[in-house]
Image (tube, grey):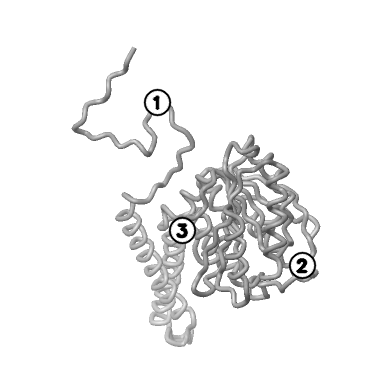
Amino acid sequence: MAQKGSQMLSVVVPVFNEEQSLEILHQELSDVAAAEHYDLELVFVDDGSTDGSWRVIKQLAEKDSRVRGIRFRRNFGKAAALSAGFAAARGELVMTLDADLQDDPHDIPNFLAELEPNYDIVSGWKRVRRDPWHKVIASRVFNWLVSKMTGVVLHDHNCGMKCYRREVFEEVRLYGELHRFVPVLAAARGFRVGELVVHHRRRLYGRSKYGLGRIVKGFLDLLTVRFLTGFAQRPQHVLGTLGLGSFLLGVVGLVYLSVYWLVAWWRPEFNLLPLTQLPALICSVSLVLLGAQLMSIGLLAELIIAQQGRDLKSYSIAERAGLPGPETHASPDQPPAENNP
């Protein structure tokens, strides 16, 4: 297994105004590492805190060589903090948890035990949540929606406590507020995703960083993730389909209006309204224009993908057999080395 010193475990902790809880969290992580004999590294990322969080992190780094600290110039968000932490982490396995003490470090051995034989990512599930009821309901609705739209069924996509293999972050890039969708983005690349029930504790210090605005932002991010995981390499499939449907519907409307105009011209005794007074004319023209625009945007997106195709991998390699690894670069002018018997 990854414990008992065979592999380094990096724990990445995003921090935003958590001065009171950092020393307690550090002590709990140290106790778990000592009990389980982990080769441990702690990476605290101060995401523009306005309290004394950075001072505490520097003190911890001076006392404990396993502690590494990163400080942002301002608040860039949790996804940016995690990206910086992942880039600085040196461990083969990476654990993330929040700094507010609601995540229990004593669950870490369970994550590693679950990760090693079965998965590339293990996400926490706060089955019993110590949060206000309105946040619990909103979270359950959000998690159900994410599971339905992405096909990655997890009870708690937004749980901050997760365990990863390092290679996940070589293929998944975080930006904006996509940190809660790492399992979805990784599953789209073929990584195996699992779930583990965790012990969720009551908040003792500070206050929650999330408000009602997270619901709207989360839904918009979900639409982005759905597009990225389903159509990132073929944007015309979705934009072109919508555009073609709109265009054809508009054409049908214009054909109907053409017949209407002919009837009104041929049989004036019917007293039909002029075309300019019919809302269907505006709707049909708008649908044709919208369809043409969507198909044009889809073609432009396809051109961009084609130009960047040399740098973007549309696949993910799990293992190699009989082939050199990615770190081996043989020169075309250099003959292959002879195999010694």
Relative horizontal placement of residue 113, taking residue 121 as reference (left or right): right
Label disc, if present, on residue 238 of the rendered structure:
3
Residue 117: % across, % down: 64, 34
The x, y position of residue 165, in whole percent, is: 56, 44
Residue 274: x and y in percent read 43, 86
The picture quadrant where one finds residue 133 is bottom right
> Residue visible at 37% across and 51% down?
312
Mark carried by residue 322: 1
Q: Residue at x 49, y 82 (%)?
A: 279
The quarter holding residue 104 reads bottom right
Q: Earlier in the sequence, mark 2 or mark 3?
A: 2
Q: Which mark is residue 108?
A: none
Label 2 sits on residue: 203
Find numbered disc 2 in the image and state the secondary structure of the residue it sits on.
Answer: loop
Examine the rendered structure and indicate whether residue 57 appears above or below residue 234. Answer: below
Regarding mark 3 in the picture, which secondary structure is present there? helix
Q: Give the camera-side residue of 320 and 202.
A: 202
